[in-house]
Image (spheres, coloured by chain):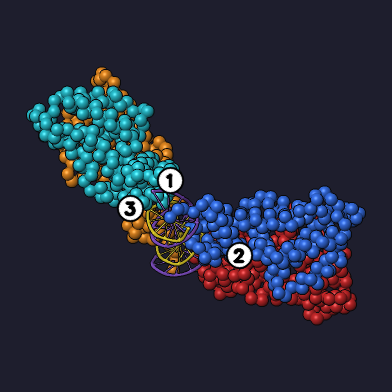
Chain colours: A orange, B cyan, C red, D blue, E yellow, F purple
DNA sequence: CATGAATGAGGGTTCATTCAT
DNA sequence: AATGAATGAACCCTCATTCAT
């Protein structure tokens, strides 16, 4: 029989790669990068260990692509006319949107926070994370500066920390954390 | 030389154990639990690998005792006449104290946050962490309730998250994070 | 286009097989049998991994056929009226010819010498190599016997070893080894 | 009980290390470096796989130490007053000695010849082998130069090749190769 | 005939844990 | 109490081989 066409192969490749990326995300998010074994990821994806290495150079590479994918998704959501000053309404939108992103990407954020604490790993990603967060930080800094608030930098740092902290606590107990109520208070206090 | 008394022996034992606990805390905080090897801990403590197993059943047990120790320390600091209602002044004291604790226990908190995201590990500790945080939560809840603030539970959850978020961000970049400025804003917004 | 005739198909088949054999020879000679991967051979031959298994049972089989081909080529060059006694002139010719063969089949001889030391691999070939060398040995033995030289067997063994040793040393540093000068001395000493 | 003294430990270490070196030499000589697995070496030495890594950084390191040991042994045997011109008697001694060394270190020489053919591996050893052979080459060059023989360099190259070739052929069939007879002829032709 | 995705055994290596001393 | 040599399970990764297409 004739071999598969290039198109078919590309389709397979894309699907399988995504399958592995998803499995990797779940496993790494649950167990952490070091404890999440390639074996487990293969099992989770329903494939053999070896196949992972058809799509990724090594375990590091798999992690990098998982993160890159997540970061891309974040950026695509947050992409805004860069140096635009935002209104209070837009501020609310951003906060809301951030919470939606958090809720819709539990695994990614769990992975993010577990990586962020580990010295050696963070270096793998260079400025990925910084780049991901930059638009948010820039926009917020401008927002606070415009409101003539004293020390806008500290305000933004705090707001970022708040989002981080809420994220972590919510991820730890998604069913019990009063996310919506907390959101309201944040908006009230930080707008 | 005369043979050591039982008391002296106990003292030695306690010292050695503490030595290992300290070394373990530093290594786990720096490398993470999985990557922080027993060998490294032994080296850091200046003892042999085998001796660790005289004091601890296994690596998990070592981690548990490290955490338990840290939690005890937290509790001892925060120990307050339990159901006492606190004044605003005391509220300020608590916040301040929390920041001091954070700054003085970088290793512990780094370890804490690196563990907290990992499902498998978290189960090792059952309610340890919850118990550690309970007094803080209780006191704050009472404080907000007394001020007739709407939804005190959500307020406390948020305050806890804020402390978590600030903790993480500070730990990531201790030299660059504007901790004092952030503290001021927190007090202003949450008192 | 008209469909290919059976003959043409056979021709293609033969070509493909030869393509693989050549690629295999180069790769095995360069990397060694164990480290020369099937994948690399396929790439070198410009075909797919799978196709190799249409022509060869397995990697061992490919090696065997590569060696068999090389041995055949040697034999065809050396083929002489079997039990004929050779003159000194013919002796010179043989030596010269041997050097030419060496120079013209660097890959084969590199592979040959890399295999010859390994017990496990050598068994794959049974008497291949012996058969390859037999005509040379026979001819030379007769030559020396005829000259009434004492212990012609040892002389032939030595001559064979000389050719082996020169081969190896030349293969190790083809550009620096004084092959022509060495040849002159050999002829002088062994004719 | 008290732990072992440093002396005892050193003794153990030395013995075990030598055990592994010997096992490694045999396995690598028989199977080649790449095909000779750490597993097999452990089995041959009667120890666990892991123990090898107590004594050697990795597989490469094991090979290096095996070779270093062998080279040292060679050098110690051949050590001669360096720039001394040798007599014919001494020449005979050297040739004889070389054959003894060959016979007494079959594994080492099998390993040597199997390595020498492999491009990538040879580089691991830099000038080890060259240094090992240098005294032999120097001494012989001087010997031939002194005899006013034309092209002493080619003579030495040939003599070296002869020793190599005889070595290989003998190693391939130690029981059948007429080593003593061959030695006589070599001496006769090359002295 | 031809492809390359997929498998799984086996490779080198690390490391928690044990145990003779 | 103290040591560190020794073990073996589990890790990441490679590669010969198979098979659906």
Residue C180 appears in the rendering: no
Q: In this view, does B59 lie to the left or right of D90?
A: left
**Residue located at (29% from left, 47% from top):** B64
| Chain that bears disc 1 | B
Q: Mark 2 points at which residue?
A: D26
Q: What x and y, as percent, mark residue B13?
A: 35, 45
Name the chain letter of the residue that bears numbered label 3.
B
Question: Is residue B99 visible in the rendered structure shown here?
Answer: yes
* Chain of the residue on which disc 2 is drawn: D
What residue does disc 1 label? Answer: B47
Residue C4 point in image, percent of width and height: 54, 71
Q: In which quarter of the image is residue A13?
A: bottom left
Name the quadrant containing residue D20. Answer: bottom right
Residue nearer the viewer, D80 or B146:
D80
Which residue is depicted at the point 79% across and 57% down? Answer: D157
Residue receiving disc 3? B57
Above or below, D122 relative to C117: above
Local secondary structure at mark 3: loop
Task: List the single residue furthest toward the front.
Answer: B2
Sequence-first disc among 3 and 1:
1
Q: In the image, residue B128 lies at what x, y percent? A: 23, 44
Of B45 and D147, nearer the camera is B45
Q: Which residue is drawn at 40% across and 44% down?
A: B2
Measure the alpha-carbon separation of dots 2 and 1.
38 Å
Q: How far apart in space, not on screen, are marks 3 and 2 (Cα)?
A: 41 Å
C-alpha distance separating marks 3 and 1: 17 Å
Task: Give the vertical position of D123 relative to C120 (above or below).
Answer: above
């Amino acid at each position: 029989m004739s071999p598969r066409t290039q198109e078919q192969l590309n389709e397979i490749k894309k699907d399988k790669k995504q399958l592995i990326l998803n499995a990797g995300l779940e496993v790494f998010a649950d167990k952490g990068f070091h404890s999440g074994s390639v074996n487990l990821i293969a099992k989770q994806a329903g494939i053999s260990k070896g196949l992972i290495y058809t799509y990724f150079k090594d375990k590091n590479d798999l992690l990098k692509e998982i993160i890159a994918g997540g970061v891309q998704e974040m950026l695509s959501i947050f992409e805004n006319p860069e140096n635009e000053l935002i209104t209070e309404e837009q501020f609310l939108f951003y906060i809301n949107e951030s919470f939606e992103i958090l809720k819709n990407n539990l695994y990614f954020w769990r992975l993010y926070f577990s990586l962020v604490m580990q010295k050696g790993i963070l270096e793998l990603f260079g400025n990925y994370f910084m780049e991901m967060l930059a638009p948010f930080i820039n926009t917020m800094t401008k927002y606070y500066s415009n409101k003539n608030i004293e020390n806008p930098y500290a305000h933004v740092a705090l707001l970022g920390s708040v989002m981080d902290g809420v994220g972590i606590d919510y991820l730890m107990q998604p069913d019990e954390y009063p996310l919506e109520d907390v959101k309201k208070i944040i908006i009230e206090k930080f707008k």
